[in-house]
Image: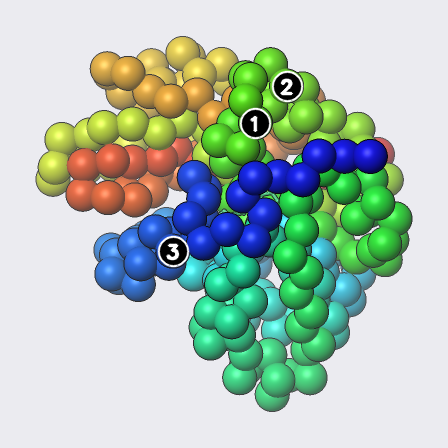
Amino acid sequence: MTQRDQYEGAYFTPSGGLVWHWRALWRRRYWMDFIDSVAAALDHWHPPQKKLLLLGPSAGWCLPTDFLVRFKEINAIDLDPLAERIFRFNHGRPLNNAGTKLNFDLENIFTSFDAILERFPDHAILFPNMLGQHLYHVADTDTARVEIEAVKEKLASRHWASIHDRLSGKIRSGAPLPTSFSTREALTPESLAIKLGLSGEWVDHLTTHVLPEGTERRLVGWRLLDSWIHIVEIAAVAPR
Ligand SMILES: C[S@@+](CC[C@H](N)C(=O)[O-])C[C@H]1O[C@@H](n2cnc3c(N)ncnc32)[C@H](O)[C@@H]1O
């Protein structure tokens, strides 16, 4: 028996909910470079499956509709009770026009991860910026890290991709974002910060080793707020 997440079905959560939707509504127009980077990466991801499992998509504010309509069926799982309605507002019409079936479930991905994978055996899987949020849902850092790092073993036989936070922190308003780059190396938070020229204190989102060793990944900056940025990693993984 797993414990119910205190945030399941809640309107305010540390990684989504009302605050996230409000922010996205007002700031999305400043996120276009980041959204374009996500779209470019997903454009190169062509899993053979026609079904997609979206784990923690919120309302898909940063997800390209062109990518979503490539699938015949999308199953989405999120803790946020508002996610489905706003996702349908953001993407519903083109999905309908393309004949893509969309189903949403309100569930905690980490308390029923194995059962979810069994429920959707024929789906490619995308984590659209949720793995780096797990530290906000678990009381201790070690548990969060272990659960995040276990994902790659559980998905060893699946096609999957992930967009996840590596670091976040303060930046001077108006300062340029660090330059994006690609690597196969799982840089530690410290070496990543040095490589990007970041100084000061940075939140480590515990995702250093979420990808299998040697996976090609792209690191991009995202100005979430005027003076708060995230360094986001994007990668696709094929079955081993
Ligand atoms: C930053 S938002 C994702 C944003 C999304 N990429 C977009 O374009 O709008 C993270 C989402 O992950 C969800 N989430 C985080 N941990 C979760 C969990 N354990 N189970 C289900 N959903 C989770 C949150 O509810 C939130 O909607």
- Vertical side of 81 occupied by 220: above or below: above
Instruction: Look at the numbered disc 1 and give the secondary structure of its residue.
Output: loop
Instruction: Name the residue type under label 2.
Output: Thr
The residue carrying mark 1 is 138
The C terminus, quarter of image: top right
Q: Earlier in the sequence, mark 2 or mark 3?
A: 3
Decide: few, some or many residues near mark 3? Use Cα within 10 Å; few <14, some 14-19, many ≥20. some
Identify the residue at image location x=38%, y=22%. Answer: 203
Q: Position of residue 149 (x, y in %)?
A: 67, 24
- Label 2 and label 3: CA atoms lie apart by 27 Å
Residue nearer the viewer, 176 or 141: 141
Q: Earlier in the sequence, mark 1 or mark 2?
A: 1
> How many marks on residues?
3
Question: Could you say which quadrant of the image residue 42 lies in?
Answer: bottom right
The residue carrying mark 2 is 143
Q: Earlier in the sequence, mark 3 or mark 1?
A: 3
Instruction: Look at the numbered disc 3 and give the secondary structure of its residue.
Output: helix
Question: Could you say which quadrant of the image residue 73 lies in?
Answer: bottom right
Residue nearer the viewer, 233 or 12: 12
Dot 2 and dot 3 residues touching (CB under 8 Å)? no
Disc 1 within 8 angstroms of ligand 1 (CB): no
The residue carrying mark 3 is 18
Q: Position of residue 186 (x, y in %)?
A: 56, 20
